[in-house]
């Protein structure tokens, strides 16, 4: 074994406490990277099993969708781990700088000094990485089992929908390449962390090492304090701030690690709050059973006009949806009614004088051609007849749904867009041809039941046109205890008109038929959101532990390096109480700076994400105050606990021996 390796090994054995802190940080880093690789490998295996030959065709895309986020997460972990582990190596080198100077005096070269520090990293990697791999595999296994329970729930939900049948099973899968990748990245993290301290130590001359000891810098500068901190903590607080100013390089990684932890906690809680709002927004106020038909459409733009042009391949006509409605109504004593729509086939234009003042002030109603989005609403005869009676419209007339709800920067707004003087719309096809559509009646917001309003809120202009064909059509009912029997009956009825002959009828046959509860799709989405939250919380907690490990090493190294200074202060009259107060003030000062930096970034990240969310949903950014306070309080409690433990260790040292010796091992 080379002398540099022996020196590194001896140093690790002699400084067991510091070694254990470094091992903890490296293990946590390896655990996270390994866990990410386990999830990525298992996700790929799940997709291969579910998609079969389709995966071979689009395997590159699926791999990119899985591994790119995995690499981004790995990069974040490496960035934070390097900051923490590098600080530990730096503290270790500073703590024995005089020892390194003596080594240079007896013939040791700068290259050997550098190799000694690097060798420490290699020895630590040999110890830590295998432990991290094993723990990472175990945590990955447990995490995948938890995730699989959510996926099982998702599959059960989708079984109630008559559409393409699929089975998803997330089973634990890890291959040797994943473990090699995790090992290489972990080793890379350790070597990069050791590189900077190794270079710094190799450049210091032997005279500087022996002369300056732990304070190897000859440069002196004005050490600033803090009048606010002095008022808050007294003279001891002033001393603590001055020490932090004097040792900025030592404390900077610790503050950075704490900042990252606070940032991730606040960002995660902020995103979770928005996801919770999204779940509540998507929840249906009713839970009717839906029998749904949807035709495939070819989407695109008209080459001549540039307008969006959708071609509906298998529209459903009024004769068919009314026949189906009659057959569904024949099952029991509950009522079945149907509503459909044909959106993006036409655009609507109206004279600006027919707009209300509220509509004139609303942005986004008109496109670049001065036209409005149009939805041709179709209904079963019975429901249409009831609406005609409610609005006083002659049977066979076109009824304008005179309400418009839109999202304005995360806030839901509702207006009455047209005056009741409006008599007709000009309908424009994507190729620019026009026709007139007379308006015979108005259905106002006050005339709409809540469930009907939520359904009829899909376009700027919505007109109920009797006998209109539709791209999609929903038959709705509340079968109560007869739901299971009615579902089987409804399937048999739909099979008469639209049989499902392939696994993917939507693509192969040009339509899909689903029978499900109204909130089934929402439940499926919510399951995925909750799964994402659970995984996010797990990773954030583990990453935060890396940050706390870095802070532990900084506080411990700081107290050990200043043990002689503390002994001198006590010998000239400083009490143990005052000394503890100074150390607590230092920890609080670091945490305060980390709270400010991490808090700003932790709020900024979910706010920036909300900018895109609120463009699609009426969801404003907010972070529950109690969550922010809880995150910060947890950080302060952990920091105070760490400081208390290190102070307790220092109290066991002998005052005279500490002053006499250059360092306490």
Image: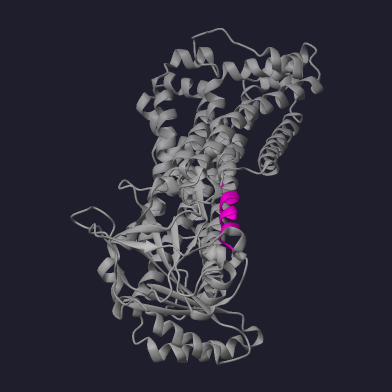
Quarter occupied by the N terminus: top left
Q: Is residue 318 left or right of residue 546?
A: left
Q: Quadrant of residue 248?
A: top right
Question: Can residue 585 be seen here?
Answer: yes
Residue drawn at point x = 35 percent, y = 78 percent: 511
Does 171 sit above or below residue 99? below
Give whichever of 511, 166 is nearer the camera.
Answer: 511
Q: Position of residue 81 (x, y in %)?
A: 49, 41
Q: How many marks?
A: 0
Pick the residue in front: 65 or 306: 306
Up the image or down, 355 lies above or below 503; here it is: above
Task: Give residue 464's position: percent from left, percent from top.
Answer: 46, 68
| Magenta highlight range | 271-283
Residue 376: image location, x then y, percent? 40, 66
The residue under the point 40% across, 92% down is 496
Q: Position of residue 210 (x, y in %)?
A: 50, 15
Provide the major secondary structure of the magenta segment: helix
Residue 319 horizontal side relative to residue 641, left or right: left
């Amino acid at each position: 074994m080379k002398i540099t390796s022996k020196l590194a090994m001896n140093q690790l054995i002699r400084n067991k406490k510091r070694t254990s802190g470094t091992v903890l940080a490296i293990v946590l880093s390896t655990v996270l990277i390994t866990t990410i690789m386990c999830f990525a490998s298992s996700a790929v295996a799940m997709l291969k099993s579910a998609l079969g030959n389709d995966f071979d065709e689009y395997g590159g895309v699926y791999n990119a969708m899985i591994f790119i986020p995995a690499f981004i997460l790995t990069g974040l972990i490496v960035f934070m781990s390097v900051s923490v582990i590098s600080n530990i190596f730096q503290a270790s080198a500073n703590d024995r700088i005089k020892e390194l100077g003596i080594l240079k005096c007896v013939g040791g070269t700068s290259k050997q000094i550098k190799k000694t520090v690097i060798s420490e990293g290699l020895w630590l990697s040999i110890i830590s990485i295998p432990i991290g791999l094993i723990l990472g595999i175990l945590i990955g296994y447990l995490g995948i089992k938890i995730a699989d329970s959510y996926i099982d729930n998702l599959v059960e939900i989708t079984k109630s929908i008559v559409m393409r049948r699929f089975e998803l099973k997330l089973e634990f899968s890890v291959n040797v390449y994943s473990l090699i990748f995790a090992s290489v990245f972990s080793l890379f993290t350790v070597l990069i962390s050791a590189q900077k301290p190794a270079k710094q130590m190799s450049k210091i001359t032997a005279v500087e090492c022996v002369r300056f000891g732990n304070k190897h810098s000859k440069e002196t500068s004005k050490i600033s304090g803090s009048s606010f901190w002095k008022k808050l903590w007294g003279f001891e607080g002033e001393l603590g701030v001055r020490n932090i100013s004097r040792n900025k390089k030592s404390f900077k990684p610790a503050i950075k690690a704490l900042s990252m932890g606070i940032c991730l906690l606040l960002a995660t809680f902020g995103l979770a709050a928005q996801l919770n709002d999204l779940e509540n927004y998507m929840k249906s106020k009713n839970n009717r059973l839906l029998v749904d038909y949807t035709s495939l459409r070819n989407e695109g733009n008209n080459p001549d006009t540039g307008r969006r042009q959708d071609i509906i391949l298998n529209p459903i006509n009024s004769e068919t949806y009314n026949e189906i409605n009659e057959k569904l109504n024949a099952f029991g004593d509950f009522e079945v009614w149907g509503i459909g729509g044909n959106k993006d086939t036409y655009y609507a234009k109206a004279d600006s004088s027919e707009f209300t003042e509220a509509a004139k002030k609303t942005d986004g109603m008109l496109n670049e051609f001065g036209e409005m989005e149009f939805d041709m609403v179709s209904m079963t005869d019975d429901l249409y007849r009831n609406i005609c009676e409610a609005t006083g419209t002659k049977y066979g007339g076109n009824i304008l749904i005179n309400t418009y709800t839109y999202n304005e920067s995360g806030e839901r707004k509702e207006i009455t867009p047209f005056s009741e003087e409006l008599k007709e719309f000009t309908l424009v096809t994507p190729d620019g041809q026009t026709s007139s559509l007379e308006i015979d009646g108005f259905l106002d917001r006050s005339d709409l039941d809540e469930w009907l309003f939520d359904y009829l809120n899909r376009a700027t202009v919505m007109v109920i046109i009797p006998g209109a064909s539709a791209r999609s059509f929903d038959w709705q009912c509340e079968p109560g205890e007869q739901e299971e029997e009615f579902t089987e009956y409804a399937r048999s009825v739909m099979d008469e008109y639209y049989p499902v002959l392939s696994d993917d009828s939507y693509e192969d046959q040009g339509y899909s038929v689903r029978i499900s509860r109204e909130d089934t799709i929402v439940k499926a989405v919510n399951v995925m959101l909750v799964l994402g939250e659970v995984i996010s919380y797990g990773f954030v907690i583990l990453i935060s532990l890396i940050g706390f490990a870095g802070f532990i090493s900084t506080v411990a190294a700081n107290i050990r390096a200043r043990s002689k200074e503390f002994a001198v202060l006590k010998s000239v009259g400083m009490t143990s109480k005052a000394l503890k107060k100074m150390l607590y003030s230092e920890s609080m000062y670091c945490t305060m700076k980390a709270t400010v930096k991490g808090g700003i970034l932790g709020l900024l990240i979910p706010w920036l994400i909300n900018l895109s969310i609120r463009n699609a949903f009426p969801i404003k950014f907010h972070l529950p105050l109690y969550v922010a306070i809880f995150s910060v309080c947890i950080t302060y409690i952990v920091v105070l606990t760490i400081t208390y433990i290190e102070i307790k260790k220092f109290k066991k040292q002998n005052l005279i021996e500490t002053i006499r010796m250059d360092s306490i091992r």
